Amino acid sequence: MGRTEVVRDVNAPASAVFDAVAHIENFREIVPDITGVEFLSEQHTGVGARFRETRRFGKRESSTELEVTEYVPGERVRLVADQGGTVWDTVFTTSARPDGGTQLTMVMDANAYKLAAKLINPLVMGMVRKAIEKDMDAVKAHCEASRATD
């Protein structure tokens, strides 16, 4: 199992940061590497929402089907994908700070169940971490810029 954890302190209210990561329409607009989203369920938010996300990795694009399996408004959202012989279990958590800002934490567990994935995942986890950090930086920049214009 591979685990990646990325934390960002965001100078914006927790509600705004949660909305940025928990609502795929918002996340898609914030993260430049997401090139498309297709909803696979009538529900677009909350437990049971399913969608196909297409994103750019360098010069390539890849699509992944994700499902929201946990949703606690203003606190955390869990997205699960089964891709390439691995279950990717991602949890975004927002915690209000006393100064009015937010601590945004993203934990991704990659649980490989096929031999090829067990061999390849350790080699790609560095690239995955860089992509996650880029996403988290985009969320931080967006939320802080939005707060500055309020």
Image (spheres, rainbow, N blue to C red):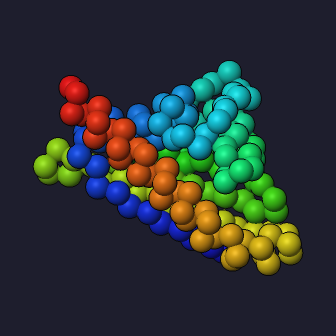
Measured from the top left, where is residue 17 in percent x and y?
35, 40
Query: Position of 39 compared to 34: left or right?
Result: right
Q: Residue furthest left?
A: 99
Kindly indicate the quadrant of the structure image that contains residue 117: bottom right
Q: Is residue 66 visible?
A: no
Seen from the viewer's position, the closer of residues 29 and 86 is 29
Measured from the top left, where is residue 9 in percent x and y?
29, 55
Residue drawn at the location 74% of the way across and 50% of the way down:
60
Residue drawn at the location 55% of the way across and 45% of the way down:
70
Rendered position, 33 above or below 122: above
Q: Residue furthest top?
A: 42
Query: Position of 18 compared to 40: left or right?
Result: left
Kindly indicate the quadrant of the structure image that contains residue 37: top right
Q: Residue furthest right?
A: 115
Residue drawn at the location 47% of the way across and 66% of the way down:
5
Rendered position, 149 above or below 66: above
Rendered position, 47 above or below 99: above
Measured from the top left, where is residue 96 in percent x and y?
25, 48
Measured from the top left, where is residue 14 in percent x and y?
29, 41
Rendered position, 137 above or below 86: above
Q: Is residue 98 visible?
A: yes
Residue drawn at the location 33% of the way across and 38% of the way down:
143
